[in-house]
Amino acid sequence: MKRVLFFLVAGSWPLAAQQRSIALDDYYRLEAVSNPAISPDGRWVAYLRGYTVEAENRRRTELWLVPFDASAPARRISDSTANATDPRWSPDSRLLSWSAGGTNFIRIDRPADAPFRIPGLNESPVWSPDGQWIAFTRATPPDTPAPPAVSADEKKLQDRFTGRASEWMDYRFDGRGYLPDPRDPRATPPREIYVLPAAGGIARKLTSLGVDATDLAWKPDGSSIAFVADYSQRDERLYERGDLFTVALDGTVKRLTDDGFNHNSPAWLPDGSLVFTRQEGLSLVIASRRDRGAPVDVCRMPSTGGAMQNLTRDWDLLPGEPEVSADGKFILFTAGIGGDVHRFRLPVAGGAVEQVTTGARRLGGVSLSASGDRMAYAATDPLHPAELFVARGDGKDERRLTRLNDALLAEISLRPAERVRFRSKDGTPVEGWVMTPRMASPSMRAPLLLAIHGGPHGAYGTDFSFQFQYWVSRGYAVLFTNPRGSTGYGEPFLWGTWGAWGDRDGEDVLAGVDYAIRNYPVDSAKVGVTGYSYGGFLTNWIITQTTRFQAAVTGAGISNWISDYGTADIPRTKESEFFGTPWEQRGSETLWRQSPIRLASRVRTPTMFIHGEADLRVPIEQAEQMYTALQKNAVPSRFVRYPGMYHGGWSPWNTVHRYNEETRWWDRWLRGPTP
């Protein structure tokens, strides 16, 4: 068993005079950097500053600008009337745009000028390499006759009807609510490609696909645009399988792929060929009934179509959006590796993948200057929320440009995360992290909380968690691990939960608990388990398998895969990773076998259920079923419901309330004397 101490990149973070424990209200003071965008000439870095307005119970994002060399203080560009998103630069570095109630621009060479808009443009710009044209996509209703008018009596009936009616399958989606008919281009107009002179005017429509065009990328000579479109978009029974296309400025469209794979993020090489990510479409995976998913690879092919070269066939991780280096020799991308996220590159002709940045941390939003000699990115680690960093293109000479959280961090005492590696029941190596509180006496042992991430195809790692820091400040040790199913550890590990969620991954996290009890000052008689989404499912599952936990908190967790199939907004996970639908024999057997509700009579662990009432990814009926079962069986349980909260986003007040509820539950069941 190997223990690896968490470390900081030298010189990246200052040492602070830490004085007090973190408090719940400190959540409202945290800020974070996201979406850095370095100017093509490398002189400026735009970024989004995210913060919370506690009194208004909302989060805000503002656009800020700072010189790369930090020769002047950062200044705010956008106002606070609308959240800023999507900062982008013109090729000559003179114009910076962002979205906030439309597309806004400022002139960097005339800083006193007010923001303005380009006539004819209200969407995010994709600049041509010479800066003469702007491409964008716009929702475009079809040019078809309007439906016939209804009678007066029918109109009266419709006006008085306050319900909803649908004749399509994808009628709702988490965070978006109820959806119009996705099959009808009048109800869901396709996003077609347009081009507009840089000075503005009347946009010219280039495509008439009838489906959305995405991932626009100009050819270096400005003669055409590569993009992605999915002709199966309006077929609700198929899953994403975007294909590659090009469109010339005269509107000539050429389709490059049609193989059932899902293609994304094309980028041009100097020789006119394309690189992109490629993964076998989920519809093909489901049809093949394979016992694992498909890899994501970086591929290359001529822009006229033809033979395709897989550049990462021998690299076992998940590459992000590819970019081409300024000299045309390398393909660059970001990827998770273990619990870290870093920058990688590989030769355009193929070869070994090389890691460019290092350290126990996670990078995000990496942005390169036009020459590739400078880059900007956000970085976070367990002791620091995300801040803005800059470095040379090779990752050297790193400097931090923002200090959004220094004042808060100087006040509070935080605890580091120690990276640990241990082996599961079958010998599989697993990675995790342990955070321990400061103890009044060396002989004291802390209650231990096992935290399980969502996904399962996600990963915990070296980033900042207010929730974990708060628990540690209250005297709890926290163990968080990346069991099988997690990203960043290779394909066999990634698909290790296929068809059996809860089995091997459950063994992995329990092995982590055993490791923590053997190697850290924790109390084996006071152990809790918790997780959200997939982590909530695994929490539900684990308490049906063992009585070793003295308390549990299930956040938005699935209890019954059969009922979840028909009530959740996406069925694809069940159809692929559980081998079919509830009406197919293999699917129904697998779904029911892995449903915690089937084994609810075994549960003895006091459990609290936390769920948003507007959750459409894991509908609240999942918590209702498990809660009812525990109440029926006289197991101590509590149900905390949050009106209006969906699966993927909670308001600040409810987030803080949830953290308090969780901690009170731990205090109730894990604070008593050890027998």
Image (cartoon, grey):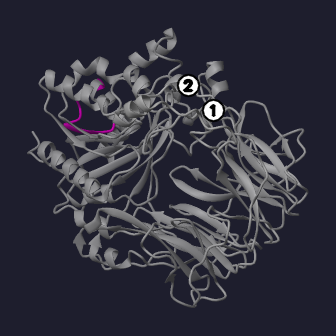
- Measuring 38% from the left and 78% from the top, which residue is drawn there? 406
Task: Identify the image quadrant of the C terminus.
Answer: top left
- Measuring 31% from the left and 50% from the top, which residue is drawn there? 478
Residue 347 image offset from top left, x and y in percent: 81, 55
Q: Quadrant of residue 177?
A: top left
**Within 10 angstroms of label 2, few (less than 14), some, or many (20 or more) residues?**
many
Q: Amino acid at mark 1?
A: Arg
Q: 134 above or below 19?
A: above
The answer to whether residue 442 is seen in the rendering is: yes
How many dots with numbers? Answer: 2
In this view of the protein, which residue sits in the foreground, 50 or 659? 50
- Measuring 72% from the left and 75% from the top, which residue is drawn there? 40
Residue 370 image offset from top left, x and y in percent: 75, 72
Residue most extreme to the front? 152
Q: 656 above or below 314?
A: below
Residue numbers of the magenta segment: 545-556
**Within 10 angstroms of label 1, few (less than 14), some, or many (20 or more) residues?**
some
The answer to whether residue 398 is seen in the rendering is: no
- Measuring 27% from the left and 72% from the top, which residue is drawn there? 412
Disc 2 element:
helix
In this view of the protein, which residue sits in the foreground, 170 or 228? 170
559 part of magenta stretch: no
Residue 266 image offset from top left, x and y in percent: 75, 51
Say which mark, if any, is on residue 576: 2
Q: Which residue position holds label 1? A: 234
Residue 613 appears left or right of 144: left
Which one is earlier in the sequence, the residue at label 1 or at label 2?
Answer: 1
In this view of the protein, which residue sits in the foreground, 189 or 93? 189
In this view of the protein, which residue sits in the foreground, 261 or 364? 261
Q: Amino acid at mark 2?
A: Ser
